Image (cartoon, grey):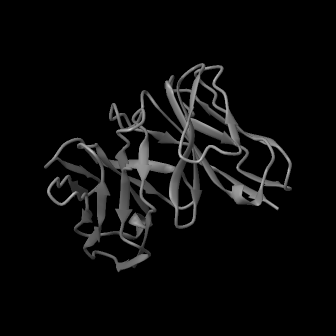
Amino acid sequence: GDSVTQMEGPVTLSEEAFLTINCTYTATGYPSLFWYVQYPGEGLQLLLKATKADDKGSNKGFEATYRKETTSFHLEKGSVQVSDSAVYFCALEDGGSQGNLIFGKGTKLSVKP
Amino acid sequence: NAGVTQTPKFQVLKTGQSMTLQCAQDMNHEYMSWYRQDPGMGLRLIHYSVGAGITDQGEVPNGYNVSRSTTEDFPLRLLSAAPSQTSVYFCASSYSPAGRALNEQFFGPGTRLTVL
C-alpha cells in the first residue's frame, strides 16, 4: 500500500541554519503531497502542499518540491528560527480510500538560539 | 469560530472502562476523522466520516466505535479500554476529504488518554 518515509529525528540546529527534512513516498499514481507542523502541546496545522509533479509548495519561508522521478517531497528552509521548533509530518493522499491522508512518523526539530 | 474542539483534554481510565471522546466543529465541514498519535508511529487513522450518517473504518479501528448523527459532532467511543489504547487522540475536519479536494484539514488540540 501507499506509504511515507521521513528522516529520523530529532534534528537539532542553531538559529539561522539551513534545514532539510527528507520525505519519500510510495504510491500508485500521483497523489497530492503535504507537510503538516505540530507545535508543542497543539494539534497539527497544514504548512504547505503540492498537487502535481514539479509543483513547489511554500509557506512561512518553508518550501518543498514534488519530485516524481525521485518520489520525494523534501522540506527546506534557508534560515530557521527558534520559533520553528516543532514536529514536522509529511503526508500523502491515500488514493485507495476516500481521500484520507497517510502520515509519516514525524521529525522533531529543535532550534537553539 | 471555535474551530475544532475536543473534550476532555486529559483522561485516565482503568482497563475495561468505557468512555466517549467528544469532538465538535463549527465550520460546517462535511468530512471529519479521528487519529491516534503514538511515539515513533506518526498519526494513524481510526475512523472517518464523509457526512452525517456515514462513517467508515481507517487503519486502526478495532476497539473504537463512532457515529455521526449531526454535521457538527463526531464522538469516538472506547467500548472496553485497554492499555494499548493509551495515546493522544486528535479529531480533524475539512470541507471534503483532505487529500482528495486539497482542502486544509483542521485539527483539534487533542485528548491525552492513559489506560491503566
Q: Residue at x 29, y 61 (%)?
A: A24
Quadrant position of residue B46: top right
Q: In which quarter of the view is residue A25 placed?
A: bottom left
Measuring 58% from the left and 20% from the top, which residue is drawn there?
A: B52
Report whether A41 appears left or right of B84: left
Picture quadrant of residue B112? bottom right
Question: Looking at this view, is A109 or B86 the one in front?
Answer: B86
> Residue at position x 44%, y 75% from top?
A10
Vertical placement of residue B15 versus B67, above or below: below
- B37 left or right of B12 in image: left
Above or below, comparing residue A79 to residue A61 in the picture: below
Seen in the picture, residue A109 relative to B63 is either above or below; the reply is below
> Where is residue A76 shown, x and y percent of the image?
25, 64
**Residue A36 locus on image (x, y percent):** 40, 52
Residue A5 locus on image (x, y percent)? 36, 63
Quadrant containing the C terminus of chain A is bottom left
Residue pictured at 18% horizontal, 60% vertical: A70
Q: Nearer the viewer, residue A104 or A95?
A: A95
Position of B97 relative to A89 (above/below)? above
- Name the spot of residue B71 as percent of width and height, x first: 58, 21
